[in-house]
Structures are given as C-alpha cells and as structure tokens.
Image (spheres, grey):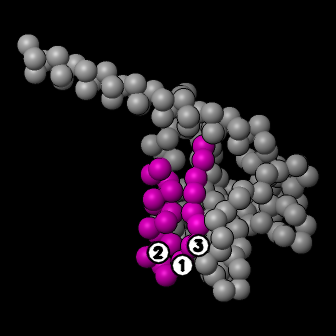
Amino acid sequence: MNALETIVPEFPPCSFAAGGQRIAVAVLHATLGGSTPFACLLFLKAMEGGLRRLGIATSYSGALFGPGFVLWLAEVADPNPALQAVRQVLGEMELMAMCEIAFWNAEDSAWQTIHPLGSPLPFGRFLVPAAVEAAVERTAADQEFLKNLMAFFRAKLASQEKG
C-alpha cells in the first residue's frame, strides 16, 4: 500500500452507470533529457488505442510526465478486464519490465500496485503534489517554447515572402 500523501486526479464526470474505477501505468526510464510531451502523447495514444482494440472503454484517459517516467491514468467501468488488457497492451509493446501498474483503492484511499508484485516503492510517488506541479510547469514551459518557435518561423516566412 502507498504511504505517501498523493493527489487523487480530478476526472470529468464518469459516463459509466455504476461509476468508474481508476487505473494507472507508469513507464520508468532513464534518459538524459527525461520525458517529453511527445513521449507522453505517444504513450497516451498507444494505451487508448490498445484498450479500444481489446474492447475496453474509458470514460477518461490522460497522461503526465516527470523526470524518468511517463504516467497514464484512466477511468474504466470494471478494473479487472481493463487491467488484463493493460498487461496485454504493455506486453505487445514490450514495456512490462519498465512499468508499474496500479489501481485506486478507494477503501484505503491509496494507489495499490499490482505489477510488479511486492514493489518496495509506493505507486503514489508519481502523484505527490510536487511531481504533479512539476509536470504541469514543464508542460506549460514546453507549450510556451513551441508557441515562441512557431511565432519565429511565421515571422521568418513572412519576411522571406516580402523579400
């Protein structure tokens, strides 16, 4: 069980009649530059597509990233078949050895890791306020950089068209 104070992500209202269950996957990696918004988007789309292909619907799916990890969160109607599908999708992508999989245990108000079994580190460490805040700040900085880069290229193209 997780002993850390974690953020419970706010999801949009659940579209499942009986309510939804939250599941999550963290892909751990050690790269020089850390995770990127592009890696985050790729993982998000791969998980959504894989689950959809296996007949698992999500009422919400989102991702965030931090130093050394990309985190995918989803809300599903039934966590058991969804978690089996998650394992299959990750296996197909050959990522199981790099992943931690968990579900939100509402009774204990904690993320419960199901892979790897007996993990010494709590899954909730990815969702401590500092990690989420850092991910939001990094995303905002990346978006600002891309906005400025696009403005630069537009100005460059406009000046080439004039001259």
The residue that appears at 85% across and 61% down in the rendered structure is 110
For label 1, count other residues whose C-alpha is less than 10 Å away and answer few (under 14), some (14-19) or many (20+): some
Residue occupied by mark 2: 52
For label 2, count other residues whose C-alpha is less than 10 Å away and answer few (under 14), some (14-19) or many (20+): few
**Mark 1 touches mark 2? (CB < 8 Å):** yes
The vertical placement of 161 against 43, above or below, is above
Residue 36's label in the rendered image is none
Instruction: State the SS at label 2.
Output: helix
Q: Which quadrant of the rendered structure holds the N terminus?
A: bottom right
Instruction: State the SS at label 1.
Output: loop
Residue 98 is at least partly visible in this image: no
Q: What residue type is labelled 3?
A: Ser
The residue that appears at 71% across and 38% down in the rendered structure is 133
The vertical placement of 162 against 20, above or below, is above
| Position in image of residue 116 (x %, y %) | 73, 60
Tell me where the magenta segment starts and ends, as one range: 41-66
Residue occupied by mark 1: 56
Q: Nearer the viewer, residue 156 or 78?
A: 156
Magenta-span inclusion, residue 62: yes
Instruction: State the SS at label 3.
Output: strand
| Position in image of residue 5 (x %, y %) | 88, 49
Q: Distance between the residues labelled 3 and 1?
A: 10 Å
